[in-house]
Amino acid sequence: MPANTRAARGDLAPERIAAILKGLEEAYPDAVCALTHRSPWELLVATILSAQCTDVRVNMVTPELFKRFPTPVAMAKATQPELEQIIRTTGFFRNKAKSIKGAAQTITDRFGGKVPQTLDELITVPGAARKTANVVLGVSFGKAEGVVVDTHVFRIARRLGLAKGETAQAVEQELMRILPQNKWIDFSHQIIHHGRKACIARKPKCHECNLEQLCHSKDKTWHS
Ligand code: SF4
């Protein structure tokens, strides 16, 4: 086996994974979801709006959105142009308006106005694929049915050699196999913070990274 493979390096050894989790905990002990919300419903909508958009930008439009349409019932009655006008700056606003109106309708009609608390139910809500469902389950209900794999988790799990899948779903399955389930929620929050602060897509700040000695990524910009 070539000496630089993940297996040969012991990338998936429990002690290495434990060291990564410890490093993340030390660097980002208070990492939480950055999307402003006051309820599972608001978090669901904010997460749908966060696709291909920054949380900061989403947080700028949601106060107005929830002021005008505070409940799923109210949002289901909103017109498509009304929603588009409010969320326009989050990008892909036509599709997103359709999704949040559809989500409002589904939550109202099928779930009695309450956001469901299982992955199987949540992924039937328009606009809510696995990532969105995992965010809502983890943040609002403290339930770890899967691991949130956004662009940061996808990139960094691969850089750290924790996963090699080519899709978010494949990476999620790998992470679910190797991480203790009671770490799934915190791991995603911490990695997302790490991706924003240090392990950025282009030119990661490896000299500032407390995982540097554990990282064998070809993208590294600095070696100790
Ligand atoms: S050493 Fe660099 S590439 Fe590796 S996790 Fe840290 S910031 Fe990312």
Image: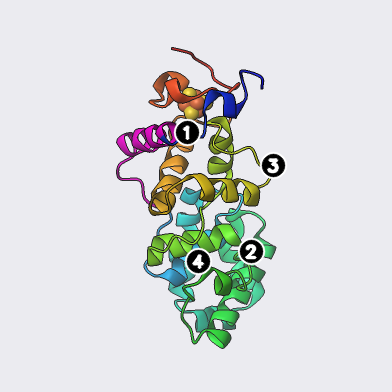
Image vertical order of residue 1 relative to residue 189, above or below: above
Q: State yes or no: residue 33 in magenta.
A: yes
Image vertical order of residue 111 relative to residue 82, above or below: below
Residue count near mark 1 (Cα–Cα under 10 Å), binned few <14, some 14–19, many ≥20: some
Task: Please state the horizontal and vertical placement of residue 4, each as a whole percent of the image.
Answer: 61, 20
Closest to the camera, between mark 3 and mark 4, is 3
Mark 2 vs 1, N-terminal side: 1
Residue occupying the point 42% across, 27% down: 211
Q: Inspect this view and state whether residue 34 appears.
A: no
How far is the residue under mark 3 from the one under mark 2? 25 Å
* Residue at which label 4 appears: 44
How far is the residue under mark 3 from the one under mark 4? 26 Å
Task: Please state the horizontal and vertical placement of residue 176, each as a whole percent of the image.
Answer: 52, 51
* Residue at which label 1 appears: 13
Disc 3 and disc 4 in contact, CB within 8 angstroms: no
Please give the label number shown on residue 166.
3
Disc 1 and disc 4 in contact, CB within 8 angstroms: no
Task: Please state the horizontal and vertical placement of residue 94, each as a whole percent of the image.
Answer: 69, 64
* Residue at which label 2 appears: 96
Residue at the extreme front of the image, as rendered: 1
Residue occupying the point 56% across, 57% down: 131
The image quarter in which residue 8 lies: top right
How far is the residue under mark 3 from the one under mark 1? 22 Å
Give the extent of the magenta segment: 15-34
How far is the residue under mark 2 from the one under mark 1? 41 Å
Closest to the camera, between mark 3 and mark 1, is 1
21, 92: nearer the viewer: 21
Closest to the camera, between mark 3 and mark 2, is 3
